[in-house]
Amino acid sequence: MKNEFFKGHGLGNDYIAVDPKNLDFKLTPRIIRAVCDRNWGVGSDGILALAPSKKADFGLRIYNPDGSEAEKSGNGLRIFGRYLYATRRTRKKIFSVETKGGLVQMELHLDRHGDPEAATVEMGQATFRPQALPCTLPVDELIQQPIEAAGQQLRFTGVSVGNPHCVVWKEQGQSWSREELLALGPKLENHPLFPRRTNVQLAVPVGSKAIYILIWERGAGETLASGSSSCAAASAAVRLGLVKSPVTVKAPGGNLHIAVDSQFNLTMKGPVAEVARGTFSPPFVRSLRG
C-alpha cells in the first residue's frame, strides 16, 4: 500500500519508519520537519528510511526532526529491526544493517507472541580522537577537556560511536537537573569546537557498573533515551575508570545495557515497542507535496 508508515519507540525515543519507494513524496528537509511535527504531523524524534545496501542485508538512513541526517541511532536501529520483522521484510532474527555511521549486526529477541520485544546491536568501536567527531581541539584524545557553555566552565569527554558525542561529567553523589540540560544542551550542541554539531550527555556515575544521563540530541533536542548516547557515555565512563563493563545506562525513559570490551567495541541491548502502523492521508500528502 502506498504511503505506509510504522511507528515505534525505544524507551520513549520514538521514530517513524518508511520505505521511500512506497511514498508519493520525497524526504526533503521541509517534509521531514512536517512529518515529525507533534502538532501538525504524525510526530516523532526522527524518520528511519529503508535504503539499498551492497554491504549489508539492509540499508538505513536516519533523519532528525529538524530535517538533518544522523549517522547512527541505537534506539532507531532497534525500531528499524522491529519494523523489518513486523512488516515481513525479513523473517531472520539476526541480520546486518548499513548506516552512514558504519555496519552493525543485530539480533532480535521475540516475546511469547512472536513479536520483537528487545534487540541486541553491535554498535561498533568507540574512539576518543578529535578527527572522528570532528572537533577542532589539537589534542590526541578528548578524554577530559575544558569547555565553556552557558557561562559555566565544564570538562567533557569527546566520543565518536559513528556519530559525535560530548559527555559532561559530575561526580558520583551529585546530579544533573533538566534545567541544566535545557541550558547547556543547545549551547554544547552548537559549540564552535564541534563544526558539525554534536550530541550531548550530562552524566554521573551511580555505582560501580551504572551511570545516569540526561540527553540532548543533535537535531532533535531533549530526548528520553538514546542508544548511541548511552554507548558513548558508557565507553567514556569505562575509559575514565569511573565504572566497569557491562554498564547499565539509566535515562529518564529507562535503562539500556552496554558491554564495552578492551578495544572499546560496543554491544547494546534494550527494549523496543511498536506503537502504530498506518498511512499518510491523501490531504496530508497533498499538503506535503504543495
Image (cartoon, rainbow, N blue to C red):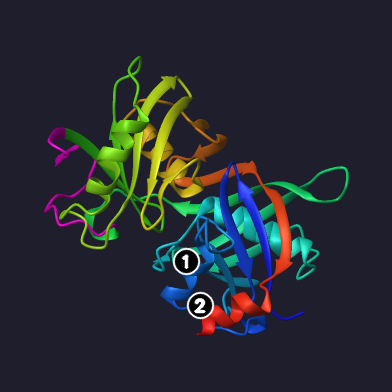
Q: Is residue 281 magenta?
A: no
Q: Main secondary structure of the magenta part?
A: loop
**Residue stretch rendered in magenta on the structure:** 133-153
The amino acid type found where label 2 is placed reads Leu
Q: Give residue 239's quadrant in the image.
A: top left
Residue 33 percent coordinates (x, y): 45, 67
Q: Which residue is mark 2?
A: 27
Hey, which residue is sitting farthest top in the picture? 173
Residue 266 percent coordinates (x, y): 49, 46
Residue 283 percent coordinates (x, y): 63, 78
Is 253 positioned to the left or the right of 278 in the image?
left
- Label 2 – label 1 distance at C-alpha: 9 Å
Q: Is residue 145 magenta?
A: yes
Q: Mark 2 falls on what kind of element?
A: loop
Task: Examine the rendered structure and indicate whether residue 211 appears above or below residue 276.
Answer: above
Tag count: 2
Task: Examine the rendered structure and indicate whether residue 177 appears above or below residue 289.
Answer: above
Mark 2–mark 1 CB contact (< 8 Å): yes
The amino acid type found where label 1 is placed reads Tyr
Is 165 positioned to the left or the right of 280 in the image?
left
Q: Which residue is mark 1?
A: 63
Residue 81: tell me if it is visible: yes
**Label 1 crowd bin: few (<14), some (14–19), many (20+), radius 10 Å:** many
Residue 26: tell me if it is visible: no
- Camera-nearest residue between 105 and 36: 36
Residue 252 percent coordinates (x, y): 50, 33
Q: Nearer the viewer, mark 2 or mark 1?
A: 2
- Camera-nearest residue between 89 and 104: 89
